[in-house]
Image (spheres, rainbow, N blue to C red):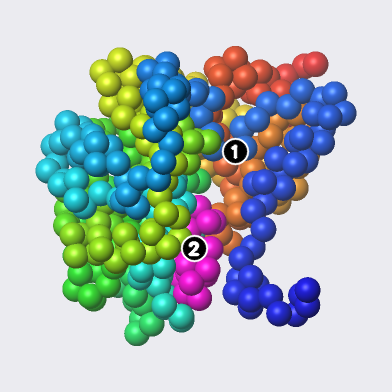
Amino acid sequence: MNLANLASRLDNIAPFHVMELAKMAAALEQQGRHIIHMGIGEPDFTAPPLVVAAATQAMNDGKMQYTSATGLPALRAAISDHYRSVYGLEITPSRIVVTAGASAALLLACAALVEKGAEVLMPDPSYPCNRHFVAAFDGVAQMIASGPEQRFQLSDEAVRLHWSAATRGVLLASPSNPTGTSILPDELAKILATVREKNGFAIVDEIYQGLTYDAQPFSALSLSDDVIVINSFSKYFNMTGWRLGWLVLPEKLVPQIEKLAQNLFICASSIAQHAALACFEPASLAIYEERKAEFKRRRDFLVPELIALGFKVPVIPDGAFYIYADCSALADDADHLVKGIMQEVGVSVVSGLDFGAFTAPNYIRLSYATSMENLQEAVRRLRKFFGKEDV
């Protein structure tokens, strides 16, 4: 194969440094080191018993054939009921498309909406794969510096200021990876109004919306029928490896997304879909709410401990399971710092390098999707690293 024939768009896809640090951690573990993993955003909880049992039953019953490209009708109806019970919203099942994870949902949305040269506005910092989905369809992710004053999120003012003739829409996440911060409802309403005024599109990633701690869960769907919302069974529902998510779309866009899904994916995993029906059983929902409370307990433990170590946490995360901490008082280079922490005391965290140039030198992201015992030990090790206790 002549590598010179590779598509030029690959030049716009950067490596995922989080995964490179995971490889470094794995190498240290092979040497016999004990590593506390606070780098990758994956819940330490797994699917509840009813979900596992539903998957087993589906396999025993032979329910392993293709489903419709839009998903099992029963699952689409269950998701619709979930919006009614949690958010008080009437979202018809026909607007819901079940996907092979939130990643497939983002890919389908970008395939439908992003053309060559089209600019999509998103905050810096933000989840790196989002800008790469745009680049995969030859669009341009226009990263807008968004500091703690904006809760690390786009503001309506920033959207208006940066909207150009090439701009086609915005891609937001609330709560966000890496910051755990949400867009305030009033600000989101202004942004969506501006996008509508500009005749653009708005994609809102809500995969962490179920893990909102300090206010009632809030969906962009309550503000507009034109917004495209992405969600997932990975985070709140603890089904990361099952690869299952969904899109909520304007009705007129569903046939176009269905056409793309038929060609690109055929359908999401049928077994995962049958299993996910059990996510909405009262016993499963009770477990999820207990786990959500545990995530909040971990956040409330870790934030003050980091501040005591000398980090700044300028915006307390209100969702997800991340803390985005300013390390500028402790180090000149966040990436150098996280590698030193891993090598010296065996705690794996990540720098802002993946999430955008604006915050990369000065911020680290810590995931508290691990046990309280691990978090307590990580704090002890960090105290040792920073010379905050006698050892």
Q: Residue at (59%, 47%) from the top-left corner? A: 363
Query: Tag 2, which secondary structure?
Result: helix
Query: Tag 1, which secondary structure?
Result: loop
Expressed as whole percent of the image width and height from the top left, the position of residue 181 reads: 39, 43
Asked if residue 169 is among those painted magenta in the image, a careful observer would answer no
Name the N-terminal-most of marks 2 and 1. 1
Kind of residue indicated by mark 2: Phe
Q: Residue at (50%, 23%) from the top-left corner? A: 45
Q: Quadrant of the C terminus?
A: top right
Q: Would you identify the image quadrant in which residue 59 lies?
A: top left
Q: Is residue 55 left or right of residue 257?
A: right
Expressed as whole percent of the image width and height from the top left, the position of residue 93 reads: 19, 45
Q: Which residue is identified by label 1?
A: 40
Select label 2 or label 1 by which is in front: 2
- Residue 184's disc is none
Whether pointer 2 and pointer 1 mark residues with C-beta atoms closer than 8 Å, the reply is no
Q: Residue at (24%, 41%) from the top-left corner? A: 73
The part of the chain drawn in magenta is: 126-146
Q: Residue at (68%, 75%) from the top-left corner? A: 6
Q: Bin the neighbour count of mark 1 within 10 Å (Cα to Cα): few under 14, some 14-19, many 20 and up.
A: some
Expressed as whole percent of the image width and height from the top left, the position of residue 150 reads: 37, 54
Q: Residue furthest right?
A: 31
Q: Would you identify the image quadrant in which residue 180 lies?
A: top left
Vertical arrangement, residue 201 with respect to residue 27, above or below: below
Asked if residue 141 is among those painted magenta in the image, a careful observer would answer yes
Expressed as whole percent of the image width and height from the top left, the position of residue 142 reads: 46, 71
Q: Which residue is identified by label 2?
A: 133
Q: Would you identify the image quadrant in which residue 325 lies?
A: top right
Vertical arrangement, residue 211 with respect to residue 390, above or below: below
Kind of residue indicated by mark 1: Ile
Q: Is residue 25 visible?
A: yes
